[in-house]
Amino acid sequence: MTAPRRSMVTLLGFTVPDDVLADVTARDAGHATQTHAFAWGLVATMRAAGCHVGLLSAAPVSTWPRNRQVVFRGGQFIHDGVEGRLLGFVNVLGLKHLTRFLAARRRVTASLGAGDVLLVHGVHTPFLWVGALAARRRGVRVVPVLTDPPGVALPTDGPLVRLLRRIDVAMVRAALRRCTGVIALTGPLAEDYAPGQPHLVMEGIFHPPAGVRPRLEAAPGVREVVYAGGLSRAYGVDRLVEAFRALPDPDLRLLLFGRGELTPWLREQSEIDQRIAPPELLDRDVLAGRLARAAVLVNPRPVEQGFVRYSFPSKTIEYLSAGVPVVSTRLPGIPADYLPHLVLAEPDTVDGLREALTRALAIPPTEVARRGAAGRDFLRLTRSPAAQGRRVHDFLASLDRSRPTSGVGRSTVTSAVSGR
């Protein structure tokens, strides 16, 4: 008698080994560090819930010519004890979506069976439609994990690009209607793009890298104010620089880790004010140690932008895990239970950031230690893979595949980010 087939969770997205990401980052105009961290946190979450996890992944690269490699070949890999397959594709506009769709469709069709779960990470249209088609198979639960809104317009977009983005948004919405449920970083992200679908709000996962170290000290007498993320005006980095320059203490240093359109401007600022270090892009394990030795960590993102209601800044978890005072603007995507662990910059102006930095830098060392321990305990108890894994497991178990996949007439299964 043949033993029954064990059901499993397949994660379709961009969960690649660390060395693949490092190679991509070195040769790409963009970088996918946060996507990479969230993806492996999601893997840890599913494994903590007792699920057998397999990966189907494409290298997270910019389209040619922003990335000069045209052909990406497929192959198998094992990373951190998890088996995965890289999907081959042609990195040219149009062909990129088509070849990714075909590669993913073939693998999903061959591997999924009754009782299995397909998680689709992100709003990548080819992968969402692979999921939408897989959702038609009896007994298969297909759940996209939405980390960003689709089709966000850029200031540089022309009329044709804006039209294509609108078409992409429509295709994303149509695919989401055909899936079983949705996991989203914020409630509005699920409610606006997958209305009527059962959804779980899970804004982040506390999954520290292996290289994270205890709090370290900077050079004697020096206190470091640190930002890590995209170096962009959209993220408020220019406001942070102006706020820092208004602080009179000569022993302060501003360190900026990341890459973006402000990189040349930031190099100029480092020549004007010697307290500002030229920007660097660091490996995540190295970055964790630099965060841990900071005096203050800052997220200066402006609150008035339309997309912030759909996003949770993952650096909030990275920052709190470092045990360092964290200055942040009051973003609507940050759940209320994080706020007692933050020093809020209100308003989100240069003056508001300067005043919040002044308050954070004045916190006594004993209080820094107490707040740091409280922040880490908060993450461990509520956002660890074990804690989030229980919530995801319960959500997946609640999805009834016998109901229509159109979303019409479904009851919405919503779980608060506090873990209730």
Image: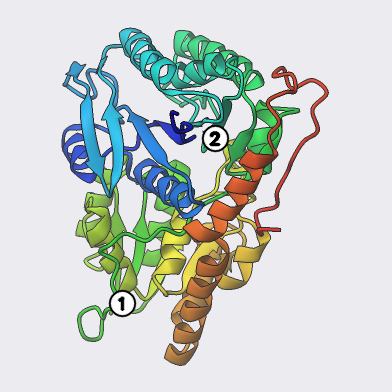
Mark 1 secondary-structure assignment? loop
Q: Is residue 254 left or right of residue 359?
A: left
Position of the C terminus, as image quadrant, is bottom right
Q: Are marks 2 and 1 in contact (CB under 8 Å)?
A: no
Which residue lies under the disc numbered 2? 146
Residue for badge 1: 214
Q: Amino acid at mark 2?
A: Leu
Residue drawn 16% across the image and 37% down it: 23
**Quick check: 277 above or below 305?**
below
Residue 119 is marked as none
The outermost residue toward the right is 409
Residue 252: name its quadrant: bottom left
Residue 30's image quarter?
top left
Q: Amino acid at mark 1?
A: Pro
Q: Badge 2 local density, few (<14 within 10 Å), some, or many (20+)?
A: many
Q: Position of residue 71 (x, y in %)?
A: 18, 16
At horizontal 65% and vertical 64% (from top left) the residue drawn is 337
